[in-house]
Amino acid sequence: MKDKKARATTDEKAYIYIIKNPSYNDICLCAYDSILYPGTPVVYDTRFGLDLGIVTSPAPDPDKTYECGSTSVCGAGCESCGGMNMEPVLMDVPDDVDYIDHLATPEEMEKYEVNSGKEEAALRVCREKVLKHKLNMKLVTAHFLLGEPKVIFFFTAEERVDFRDLVKDLVSVFRMRIELRQIGVRDESRLIGGLSVCGRDYCCHSITSQLEPVTIKMAKEQNLSLNSMKISGPCGRLLCCLAYEYDYYLEEKASCPPEGTRLRLGRDLWKVTEVNILSHKLTVQASEGQTMFIPFTEVSYNDETGYWDVSEEFQEDFLE
């Protein structure tokens, strides 16, 4: 593996890839000297040590950035939208990006399969030891590291747990290094995976390893029901997708009048009662109670008057 300090003074370029660990679902960027394609198994340096990773795609081109409000990003890497690169390209390697250690060999792939087969049995042994020591902790999963004799046990607990005696027992059984890693309930869902209320795999498990903070304000901004049962995931926390969609709602709402704004149609003033981002239409209500819909494209902000105006074409159609 290339030494980061040694290459820090050079202007070398490399291909940068998104690497995902199939065992504990970490995602990171790694560089390599040659072209690799999605699905290639590699060995890279993780926060736990050398382990197996899978190339998922080339890293996004830093010269092609997303612009707020853009609806043309398709992810296919075409020249018009600046989406993800379909083909790897040489680029400068940032200081915080490490190189892939090497491509996984057939022997290492076989070792990984053998280790994966032992993880369920290791979890059962650890659960027996937890009961023996009467520890208040819930084991989630176990993982044997590929690069060294070490097994990691992930667990959840409501408070800090003194597991020193447990580690001694596990070392006597497995004869290798033992690491117990306490995680939160959201991390538990990220590790195990499953189907969410939308029928698709958990966002935290399939597309990211960074758990972004989610607040009730995000649900309010999207006009969702504040019933906790409807906006919470299987982990019991607010849905991750609320955070992913929040920026889009802010971008869209910035280009249209907020609820409560009054729009002049003919001689009457109509009040905006709803801003529907998905249909791109405003619901407006007259003083007598009539309601109608106005597309976003028919409304614009007048800098001179400081009011929102409805287009003349729409007003003519309305008056007719």
Image (cartoon, rainbow, N blue to C red):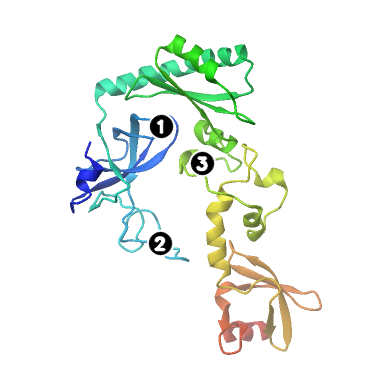
Task: Give left or right: position of 26 versus 165.
Answer: left
Say what secondary structure mark 1 lies in: loop
* Element carrying mark 3: helix
* In this picture, residue 198 sits left or right of residue 31: right
Q: In this view of the protein, which residue sits in the foreground, 274 or 157?
A: 157
For the point 65% across and 57% down, the residue is 217
Badge 2 element: loop
Amino acid on which disc 2 is placed = Tyr
Relative depth, front residue between 246 and 319: 246
Determine the CA span between mark 3 and mark 2. Answer: 22 Å
Q: Residue at x 33, y 64 (%)?
A: 80
The x and y percentages for residue 218 are 62, 56
How packed mark 1 is, by other alpha carbons closer than 10 Å (few <14, some 14-19, many 20 or more), is few
Query: N-terminal of the two: label 1 or label 3?
Result: 1
- Three-letter code for the amino acid on which mark 3 is drawn: Cys
177 relative to 223 in the view: left or right = left
Q: CA distance from mark 2 to mark 1?
A: 28 Å
Residue 132 seen in this snapshot: yes
Residue beneath label 2, please? 66
Q: Which residue is mark 3?
A: 204
Q: Position of residue 151 (x, y in %)?
A: 42, 21
Give the amino acid at mark 1.
Pro
Image vertical order of residue 116 relative to residue 92, above or below = above
Q: Label 3 crowding class (10 Å Cα cut-off): few <14, some 14-19, many 20+?
A: many
